[in-house]
Amino acid sequence: MGIEPATALAGKDLVGIATLEAGEIQLLLDTAEQLLEVARRPIKKVPALRGMTVVNLFMEPSTRTRFSFEVAEKRLSADTLNFSSSTSSVTKGETLFDTARNLMAMAPDFIVIRHPNTGAPHRLAGVVSASVINAGDGSNEHPTQALLDAFTIRRHFGSLEGLTVVIAGDIRHSRVARSNAFLLTKMGAKVRFSAPASLLPVEVEELQAEAYHRLEPALEGADAVMMLRIQMERQKKLNFPSMREYYDFFALTPERLRLAKEGALVMHPGPMNRGVEIDSEVADGDQSVILEQVTNGVAIRMAILYLLAGGKSESAAGS
Amino acid sequence: MSRLLVRNGRVIDPVQGIDELMDILIEDGRIAKLAREIKAADAPELDAEGLVVAPGFIDLHSHLREPGYEYKETIETGCLAAAAGGFTAVCCMANTNPVNDEPAVTRYIMEKANRAGAVKVYPIGALSKGCKGEELAEIGEMVQAGAVAISDSPNPVANSLLMRRALEYCKSFDVPMIVHPQDELLSDRGAMHEGRVSTRIGLRGMPAAAEEAFVARDILLAEFTGGRLHLGHLSTAGSVEAIRVAKARGSRVTCEVSAHHFSLTDEDVAGSNYDPQWKMNPPLRTDDDRRAIIEGIADGTIDAIVSDHAPHHQDEKEMDFADAPFGISALETAVSLALDRLVRPGVIDVSALVRLMSVTPARIVGVPGGSLAEGSPGDLTVLDLERSVTVDPASFVSKGRNTPFGGVTLQGGPAATVVGGRVVWRAEG
């Protein structure tokens, strides 16, 4: 394993994996490893962020990511403010910068932002002094998801280097797929995207991923398989014809899973469509680490907050 | 009798084949005389020594926003910006509120422009009622009121039958149809060019094919109907090639490119950290596309260079990329960009630039100008090829400060603008 952990995060913010160095990712994963233990304590709290304020700004519906952040913040003793809105600020006549200025007037230390449009966290980060954490922006990045996915994989294999990870499903506009591709390739893993071309971005090689139009060949020799949620809105019917056909050709079934390496991990960022992209038998089977991903998400988000606040990795879980 | 003597300039008139040091005398708004040395003791003088004097530049593609969006730009501020940018005339698009789809709006625009008194304004009438692409607007009435072309831009004409009928109908009034070629079903809410960079930075893309498919369709319909088609702000290598092929087989189509499409690429979008100052439609394309446009300019495939001036309020760009509107405030940078990116490196000479920004635009929309022959309008664009121009959005005359060129230094720029024998703008210093 050639990647040395960094001693600290270089930036004030965590807006994407694209701008992180491998050493920073290593540091985040190592720190999360130490913080994982907090959840097993009788009193699940450390004082690392005592007196600090975190604003959770969710401009797009989210349950699990928002909860996960909130749990992470509370376990670090931060004060949290939640702001949810399913409409972006523009429809209310307020600009993104107005929102930023208003938030800064309350002097938060962190702003966790989920936004329906690409680049909103990056723009916000440029105009506020608080640390901005991207909880998902448009079709761009979901860095905390990628970190928790990598963390989960690393806990099973010890390292990410040399692994082959398949990401399958609606990849074209998937921030999860993109952040995972950035992260896994930086850490020496191979990434395969599997989807009908109607669900893939153009010029996939730009993300250092290999494209497969059928799941079976993609699964051969895979160490982990990440299934993405398929959304079946009206517009998506242009991309594939029906749930039934999707399941028949592209879902992860027990038979298809056998094409992967023995003991390959089954992952899903949730929420799952059982019987569409993933068969229940697989989702609930021995190889599934889907619930571990949720648990690990809290530790990863704690690690991000902790490190952005200037904490040192070795004392992360100290009280 | 009003007079103006422009002295000692390097006079360039491609139509008459003139490129030499001359004086120009303008009387009562028209070119009265061109000669090596003119004596007109009582006439006010404009010293053009060391400067290029050309027939006035005409912008075929501007959005002046009035009526309806005066917070973005008014006809007056747009006209003053045009003058400061070296244009003596602008053709303004119909997507105002109300849309310029009937003669009353056309006349309103012309009256406002007259009152502003800076540059000439030639309204472009809507092709369809409300620019909605459903039924034809009153094209004849608008042409009678003063419209010089017909366009729904920035809306594409999605309906191919309407496109055909409009090309046919416009023949009765001898006005060109200016189109924004883009299949919006295919561009699918994209915010930038779809390709390597959009995949890398995670913005929704619009493929080059969305433009090229409509370019091909519109060329075929123009050839089929014999209508006058002018393709607006082309941005891709495939579009340039389609025009080249069409012209080679004798097609009469004409086309334009905006200054930003030969100056910037999608890599600049990536470098902006999602700043919507780099958001425009058509989007900034790849460097291959940019080079193809420059090649098309050099070999004469491209007929005109336009500003595609699309001013917006600052608040509207204080957004994330997807929520912000398309377009840049371009009247005050287009000429400098053309000088810096095309003339300075020798892609074209100044005479060719005058063709692209004055002679051919005048012919396309059939307005006076584009020539310094005696009796032509006394409209002059005076250029300083040596002047170093650093773009400062805060000092724009336009209300729109939205530009990706802030802080960029360009070599060459307008030095003075003369409309009807009146100096309407002069560079400071």
Image (cartoon, coloured by chain):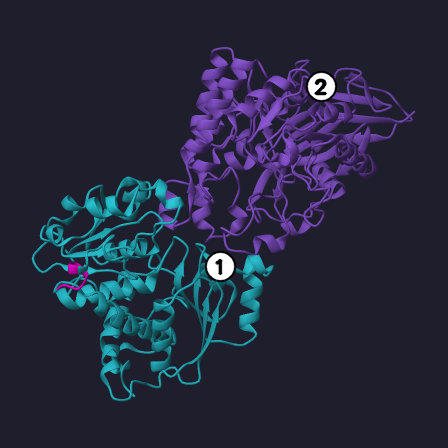
Span shown in magenta: A281-285
Image coordinates for residue A273, horizontal then vertical, percent: 27, 57
- Seen as rendered, the residue at the extreme top is B250
Image coordinates for residue B108, horizontal then vertical, percent: 79, 36
Task: State the residue in front, B345 or B71.
Answer: B71
Up/down of A318 relative to A279, above or below: below
Quadrant location of residue A99? bottom right
Residue annotated with mark 2: B371
Residue at 39% x, 66% y is A11
Magenta highlight: main SS: helix
Which of labels 1 and 2 is toward the front? 1
In this orientation, does residue B255 appear?
A: no
Residue annotated with mark 1: A123
Give the left or right position of residue B370, taking residue A163 as reference. Answer: right
Task: State the residue in front, B414 or B273.
Answer: B273
Q: What is the letter of the purple chain?
A: B
Q: How crowded is mark 1: few (under 14 residues within 10 Å), some or many (20 or more)?
A: many
Q: Colour of chain A?
A: cyan
Q: Which amino acid does label 2 sit on?
A: Ser
